[in-house]
Structures are given as C-alpha cells and as structure tokens.
Amino acid sequence: MEKFRFSRKQLGIPYGVFLVCFVAAPLIVIIYYAFTNGEGRFTMENLLGFFSSPNTIGTLVYSFGIAVVTTCCCLLFAYPVAYILARSRLRHRSVILLLFIMPMWINFTLRITALKEILTILEGNLSYYPFLNTIIGMSYDFLPFMILPIYTTLLKLDNSLLEAACDLGADAFQVFIRVTLPLSVPGIISGIVMVFLPAMTNYVVLDMLYNSTYIMGSLIGAYFSAYDWHNGSMIALVLLLVILVFTLFTNQYTDEDTGSRGGVLRK
C-alpha cells in the first residue's frame, strides 16, 4: 500500500481556509461598512462621528476604566495566590489550583446568576452600586485567566537564582523584589492581556448585574440591533485598533523582559 505523505504547505491549507473565512472575511466586511454610507459610497463621516460624539468617547473612557480596575483587582488577588501555590510545598496544591479553575467549567450564565443572588442578599438592591458590582462580576469571571499564567511562570523559576541571591546576603523581601518579581513579569503581562482585552467588551456582566451604563461591547450591539451597521462597524474597528496597539505594546515589553534574567541585586 502506498503511504500518503503531506507536505507542510498541504497541512496548512485547512488553517489558511479557516483564517480567510473566519478572520479576514469578517474584517473586510467591517472595514467596508465602516467607511461607507447607506448608499455604499466611501465616506469618513463615521470616523469623524466617532471622535465628535461625547456619548461614544464617554463610553470608550468608561470601558477603559472598567478594564483597568478589573485588571488591577485580578492582579492584586491572583499574584499572592499564584505565588503561594507555586512556591509552597503543599501536597495537594494542584487540587487547590483546580478549585480556582473550576468556575471556568461552569456555564457563564449560572455563575453570574449565582453571584447576582449573593450580591442581592448583601446589598438588597443591585442598582445602588452598579460600578462596584460590575468590577466584582468581571473580577470573578476573569480571575482564573490571571492566576494561570502567573502560576505557570512562577513554577518554572530557576531555584538556583533564588539560592544565589540568598547566598549574596539578600533577605526574603529583597529576593522577591529583585529576582522573583522581575522574572515573573512575562506571566503578569500575559495575565493582563487575557483580562484587560475581554473586560473592555464583555457587556453581559453589566446586563445581568443591572448596570445600565454602556461599554464598548454593548454600544456596538446596540448599533447592530438598530441595523446601523456603518457606525457599529466603525466603533468595532476603532476598538480593534486599540486592542491591537495594546497587544503590540505588551508583547514588545514581554520580549524585552524575557531577554533579562532578573533584577540587579545590590547591597
């Protein structure tokens, strides 16, 4: 029997078709509607309308604020958890890590509904604290995405570097600040990207927690629901560019930090 052998180019054909159909084609459609009017003619009015509309700019700023606060909250909670799990000698640390990951396996609607019931018991009326409830819901939803990359990075740290720092006279705090923390920056950056980007567009949490304020995702959905594809596509395109710039910046920072082996230990 003849053996079927495929070249790398042939094996890459399905991935190429996937990219064309589900990445390139939708992007081309968005760009087309963003720079055309109802008659199909080229126009810059949609772009000018985005930057001249106080509602749109305010929504962008509000979305950015929610994403920043959510990312900071996740980082402040996730780093100590990841550090304890990675550096401790607990027998069942994998089980403890699993407890933080398990919510990812549960339906999103069920998790947020359960959180809504808990917040209702504590607050009585969720409409009194819409921003706080949004941050709690976002942090609860995206926390595993911050813990996992930091935990993986800390778990792979070379213990000989930490021992060398101790031999040079550094105490535990100096070892953490000058060695552990700089070496864990790639994991921190990965977690920030995985939390910040979806936090800017995830409007389902706001809807379920009775926050009527629009963020970018809900604003885009409102335009498309009203069959205003042109303004909706322009907002989506601007948001895509913001996310692209943010991703390129974080990737560049990660690449630069990966080349270093840690901080400088000075007495």
Image: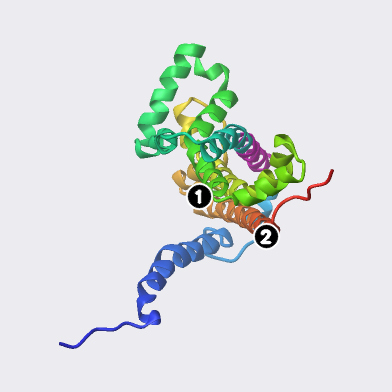
Which SS type dominates the magenta stretch?
A: helix
- Which of the numbered marks, if any, corresponds to residue 228? 1
* Secondary element at tag 2: helix
The residue lying at 39 percent from left, 67 percent from top is 18
Q: Nearer the viewer, residue 250 or 159?
A: 159
Q: Say whether residue 65 is left or right of residue 83.
A: right
Q: Earlier in the sequence, mark 1 or mark 2?
A: 1
**Residue 202: x %, y % from top left:** 50, 40
Q: Residues within 10 Å of mark 2 (few under 14, many from 20)?
A: few
Which image quarter holds the C terminus?
top right
The amino acid at mark 2 is: Gln
- Which residues are drawn in magenta? 53-69
Q: Say whether residue 117 is left or right of residue 134.
A: left
Q: CA distance from mark 1 to mark 2?
A: 36 Å
Position above or below: 77 against 180? above
In the figure, residue 44 lies in which quadrant?
bottom right
The amino acid at mark 1 is: Asp
